[in-house]
Amino acid sequence: MVEFRTMLDSSKTTAVNKNTFKRLLWVFVLSSLALICFGIIGFITKEDSEDLYSAIFCTVLGVLFTPLVWLVTGLLQKSINKSASYISDNTEEVYTFDDDKITVTQKKLDEFSAVTEAKYSYLYRVIENKDYYFLYISKMQCHVIDKKALTAGSLSELNSLLTSRLGDKFKHK
C-alpha cells in the first residue's frame, strides 16, 4: 500500500496548469514565430501605411502571444479557484494505492466529504514529473499528488504498481 496525505489547495491547479503549459509550449512558440514571420514579411512587402500597421501588429502580437496565453490562463484559473469552494487550505485529501484499487478520500471540515474507490482501469493516463503525479481521469480532469505528501510506502513501490497496472498509460517525465 502507498498513501499520500495532502491538502487540495490552489497549488494543485497551478501545478496542473504548469504541466499542461509545458506540454503545449511548442504550439505557443510556433504560433509566436509564425506571427513574427508574417510581421517581417509584411515589413518587406509593404505597399502603404496600412501594410506597415499590419506588419507591426503581427510582430508585436507574435512577441507577446506566449506570455499573454500564460497570463490569461493564470487569471482564468484564479477565477475558477475562487468559485470552487472545495479548493481550499481546509480540504484534506488522502490517496491510497492498493494492489487492485485506488481510494481517494476528500474532506473539508464538516462541509464536504467524499470517498472514491476505482480500479486502475478508471484512469485515462498518469504522468509523473519530479514533484508530482498527475492522475488524469479524462483529457481535462486530473488529481494532483505532491510527492512530498507520501505517508506510507515508497515512490518506487508506486511506480512499479502504476507500471504494472497501467502499462503505456503511465508516463515518466
Image (spheres, rainbow, N blue to C red):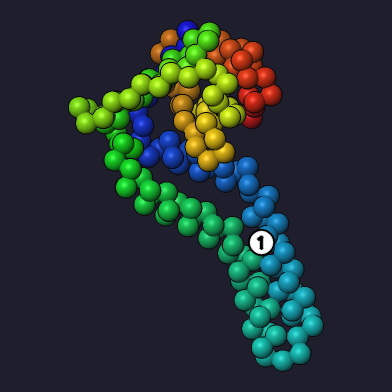
- Residue 3 position, x and y percent, is 43, 14
Mark 1 belongs to which amino acid? Ser
Vertical placement of 161 versus 21: above or below?
above
Between residue 75 and residue 165, name the one nearer to us: 165
SS of the residue under disc 1: helix
Classify the position of the C terminus by image quarter: top right
- Residue 101 position, x and y percent, is 50, 14
What residue sits 63% from the left and 49% below the top?
25
- Residue 2 position, x and y percent, is 47, 11
Mark 1 surroundings: few (<14), some (14-19) or many (≥20) residues within 10 A: many
Residue 33 falls in which quadrant of the image? bottom right
Between residue 38 and residue 44, name the one nearer to us: 38
Vertical placement of 153 versus 70: above or below?
above
What residue sits 36% from the left and 45% below the top?
81
Between residue 95 and residue 52, name the one nearer to us: 95
Which residue matches tag 1? Answer: 32
Between residue 117 and residue 158, name the one nearer to us: 117
- Residue 143 position, x and y percent, is 46, 30
Vertical placement of 145 versus 97: above or below?
below
Vertical placement of 81 versus 163: above or below?
below
Left or right: residue 74 compared with residue 121: left
The answer, for residue 150, to whether it is visible in the render is no
Residue at the outermost left position: 110
What residue sits 22% from the left and 27% below the top?
109
Left or right: residue 77 compared with residue 62: left
